[in-house]
Image: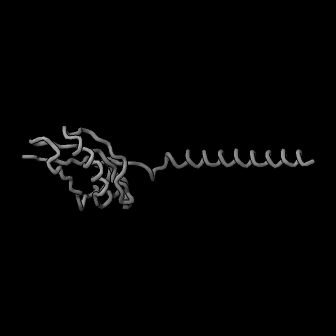
Amino acid sequence: MSRTKFLLQLLALLVIFFSWQQIRAQDVSNNSNSEDDKIYSQKEVDIKAKVTKHANVKTAGECKKGKGFISLSVVLHKTGKVTDIKVIEPSQCESFNKKAVKAVVKIEFDPAIKDGENVSQRQTIIYNYNVQ
């Protein structure tokens, strides 16, 4: 009798588990194509995102003498966070590249606006250095 009870309980747990997995998969697929998650280009918005405070990147003599820059593609998210950071063109100074990627998340900005609502916008951010 106890073995039958155990098997019934196990079967009930498996049914609950697989039902939960199916519901969860539906939620993910329903949310992934949402218009709310769209990332707009600067041309697609009514008012472009405006960076209000840049984060400084200091080389502290770690790079060779000369000039350089790093170009980053980022998403200025409608919630006010910097996300999806991608290096488009790295500088020749690896330590500067690492510091720039860490610094770019500290940018403060006003989100882009489309149809009267905050939206996420992709933007290019460039950091320069000049070591003499």
| Residue located farthest toward the left when viewing the structure as drawn | 132
Point 23% across, 58% down: residue: 54
Colour mapping: one colour
Above or below — where is 117 with respect to 41? Answer: below
Point 73% across, 49% down: residue: 16
Residue 76 located left or right of residue 15: left
Residue 80 located left or right of residue 59: right
| Residue located farthest toward the right when viewing the structure as drawn | 1
Point 55% across, 44% down: residue: 29
Residue 20, image x, y percentages: 67, 49
Dividing the picture into quadrants, the one containing residue 91 is: top left
Residue 113, image x, y percentages: 33, 58
**Total count of labels:** 0
Residue 128, image x, y percentages: 16, 47
Is any atom of residue 115 visible in this view? no
Residue 124, image x, y percentages: 25, 46
Residue 102 located left or right of residue 36: left
Is any atom of residue 132 visible in this view? yes
Q: Nearer the viewer, residue 67 or 36?
A: 67
Point 29% across, 57% down: residue: 106
Q: Nearer the viewer, residue 50 or 98?
A: 98
Q: Nearer the viewer, residue 29 or 90?
A: 90
